[in-house]
Image (spheres, rainbow, N blue to C red):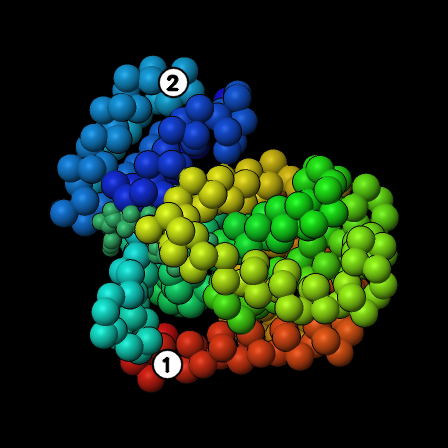
Amino acid sequence: MDATTITVTGAGGQIGYALLFRIAAGDMLGADRPVRLRLLEIPQGLKAAEGAALELQDCAFPLLQSVEITDDAATAFDGANIAMLVGARPRTAGMERADLLAANAGIFGPQGAALNAHAADDIRVVVVGNPANTNALIAAAAAPDIPGDRFAALTRLDHDRAVGQLSAALGAASAGIQNVTIWGNHSATQFPDVSHATVDGRPVPDALAERFGGADAAASWLDDEFVPRVAKRGAEIIAVRGSSSAASAANAAIAHVRDSVLGTGAGWTSAAVLSHGEYGVAEGVYSSFPVTSDGGGYRIVDGLEIDARARARIDASVAELLAERDAVRELGVI
Ligand code: NAD
Ligand code: LMR
């Protein structure tokens, strides 16, 4: 099988360190597909990336054909089949939201342009660096020759967090939980939706009603505990761990790419993909949806019923995405 070229940006950071070894081991594309790694860093991050590359060599992974490290985006994306955009500018003390968007526009705009000019024709891009949805919008806008549906932002971590919370609440194995959906932005406004989910083939709302002693108690648990716990889990991890999620984020990024390339199988997953107006989500934003893939990239699941509670929550998260888009437009970035 031909080797796949995978570019990881921010490869010297903590998610990068949790990601590279698993890609090289075959966890992402399968045990039969050789990989070439390209690591893009800023000059200050090159040493950390070089250290990871030394360790990759020491693992002697049979699938790993090469590792190249660079601080030049054109070199990093040359012939890339998969780009995982992890490196981003974090929010620092005193930084306003507009400053954060502007700083990241300065990263994701040029990287989108470099992808447009240099990536392979089959390029697929997943944006991990925050604010992930709007960074995906910025990168896609700078890459007019790459179809917008080749870009996505990571909400698989939120999806897996929701499955983890349901698994704990119901005392059920995560493998038996299907068709959870994350809607909207990878932020505290996201809506983790279990209304179509099943546990061992049974509707999750029924299982929760049994667990909590009635439909009203289950609805209260969903509104007061489950939704905020999942939506604010990133902040909880930062508070407890002292830095943001790394191994779980890398695991989710691997699962996102794996399911896009190898297919989702039964049920659906969640990813922030380009809206064409599905489910009343404003066209043109990268919003999280229920998605499936047959190996050819993510498609939005259609025909799901959206109740009034879900409608209000989806609209609120999409309003935040539109506000981010407006802020970026005001900056003249898109
Ligand atoms: P980190 O600070 O440990 O690493 C980031 C790396 O990116 C650094 O090595 C830095 O040098 C590099 N970098 C910065 N600008 C770059 C650029 N222009 N080009 C290439 N590399 C660049 O951070 P981390 O913990 O690895 O997290 C990375 C990002 O992922 C953050 O924005 C974080 O908020 C985000 N994140 C997203 C999710 C999600 O589910 N979408 C989950 C966790 C973290
Ligand atoms: C997460 O969901 O863990 C991260 O997006 C949190 C963050 O701010 O880096």
Residue, x 32% and y 71% (percent of image)?
Answer: 101
Query: Which residue bears the numbered disc 1?
Result: 327
What label sits on residue 294 in the rendered view? none
Classify residue 114 as left or right of residue 162.
left
Q: Please identify the quadrant where the C terminus is shown.
A: bottom left
Between the residue at mark 1 and the residue at mark 2, the CA separation in whole angstroms equals: 44 Å
Q: Disc 2 residue type?
A: Phe
Q: Disc 1 residue type?
A: Ala
Q: Residues within 10 Å of mark 1 (few under 14, many from 20)?
A: some
Classify residue 309 as left or right of residue 71.
right
Residue, x 43% and y 30% (percent of image)?
Answer: 22
Q: Is residue 287 visible?
A: no
- Can you give x and y, in whole percent of width and height, for residue 20 in the image? 37, 33
Q: Residues within 10 Å of mark 2 (few under 14, many from 20)?
A: some
- Can you give x and y, in whole percent of width and height, for residue 119 in the image? 37, 46
- The quadrant where residue 145 appears: bottom left
Q: Is residue 302 above or below residue 98?
A: above
Please state which of residues 118 and 254 is positioned toward the viewer in this rendering: 254
User: Cβ(mark 1) to ligand 1 < 8 Å?
Assistant: no
Classify residue 166 as left or right of residue 16.
right
Of callouts 1 and 2, which one flags the residue occurring earlier in the amino acid sequence? 2
- Can you give x and y, in whole percent of width and height, for residue 246 in the image? 39, 44
Q: Residue furthest front?
A: 213
Q: Is residue 61 above or below residue 281?
A: above
Residue, x 72% and y 76% (percent of image)?
Answer: 309
Query: Which residue bears the numbered disc 2?
Result: 61
Q: Is residue 141 above or below residue 82?
A: below
Q: Is residue 42 visible?
A: yes
Please state which of residues 59 and 120 is positioned toward the viewer in this rendering: 59
Classify residue 143 as left or right of residue 110.
right
